[in-house]
Amino acid sequence: ITKRTYTERAAAHPIAVARQLLECIDRKKSNLCVSVDVPNKASLLRIAAAAGPYCCCIKTHIDIVSDFDDDLVAQLQALAEKHDFLIWEDRKFADIGNTVKLQYSSGVYKIASWAHITNAHPIPGDGIVTGLAQVGLPLNRGLLLLAEMSSAGNLATGDYTATTVAMARRHTDFVMGYVAMRRVDEDPKTAGGVAEGEGADFVIMTPGVGLDTKGDGMGQQYRTPDEVINQSGCDVIIVGRGIYGGGDGNPDEKIVEECKRYQQAGWKAYEDRL
Ligand code: UP6
């Protein structure tokens, strides 16, 4: 498990947006990404404004928002600027290159125009990365591949995970990391023969993080920041309902309180790993 610091990795990372993320983590002492999965614009902006000072990244599912408009994007970008965080649209692209290229650039959401980071399932093969890269690379965006998932019974295990790691290694100009549950790029079972500390530097962002519950009754499985960052070697904890609480979201004070709690726990787990 890597013992390199965020600082060292930020200085050396070849992908601009990965550098930006690692620098932000370092500057704010926060490896917390807040997932804001709420159904309306006002709640999304309110929660992003409350959580913004404590996190390195806000993750959206923009297609959940029933009153989406371009002003939502403008306001979210202004918050990202003000509070110093990156925006990740958790689109989980999963189609052939030509289709995802259109889904990423066009339609109602025009994701590439505002999201620093997005992600994709590797299931269609390398074409999904080259398709997205045609849109994202000129805009200095970054891509995460889903090498593993947090939900019970998911199929992203074993050879699938190893194949995903190998795919990322073929696209190190655009693939900045993985959604994964552990340091998949250093585990001999999935690293594809690349030794620890060798090869490209991937940022591992990990959902399924909660301090108070173990699951949600719909397959989600929660682990603690210590299990994720210290014991499994991941880089960023993603916390949704543990912070915003579900529905339209907790009141601001509760969001701030939970953000601080997860930020501290995530940072302590990082320091314990070093
Ligand atoms: N997410 C997972 N597991 C994965 C991939 N993505 O939970 O394997 C996403 C979900 C949700 C967030 O789509 O937006 O991370 C987790 O939210 P939660 O903390 O409220 O469970």
Image (cartoon, rainbow, N blue to C red):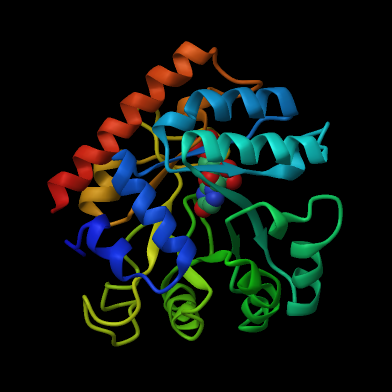
Residue 194 found in image quarter: bottom left
Q: Is residue 263 above or below residue 60?
A: above
Q: Ligand 1 lies in which image quarter?
A: top right
Q: Is residue 227 above or below residue 164?
A: above
Q: Is residue 1 visible?
A: no
Q: Position of residue 95 (x, y in %)?
A: 74, 71
Q: Nearer the viewer, residue 215 or 121?
A: 121
In the image, residue 217 sits, relative to residue 139, either above or below, namely above
Asked if 252 appears above or below 273 in the picture, the reply is above
Is residue 46 among what the camera can see?
Answer: yes
| Residue located 27% across and 49% down the image | 229
Q: Report the label total.
A: 0
Instruction: Judge left or right: residue 187 versus residue 91.
Output: left
Residue depicted at 20% across the width and 38% down the height:
268
Q: In the visual, does 150 lie left or right of 265?
A: right
Task: Identify which residue, 232 or 168, lies in the foreground.
Answer: 168
Which residue is drawn at the image coordinates 33% and 39% (left, top)?
A: 28
Q: Position of residue 266 (x, y in %)?
A: 29, 39
Q: Quadrant of residue 259?
A: top left
Q: Is residue 5 left or right of residue 182?
A: left
Which of 149/145 is in front?
Answer: 145
- Give coordinates of residue 195: x percent, y percent: 22, 82
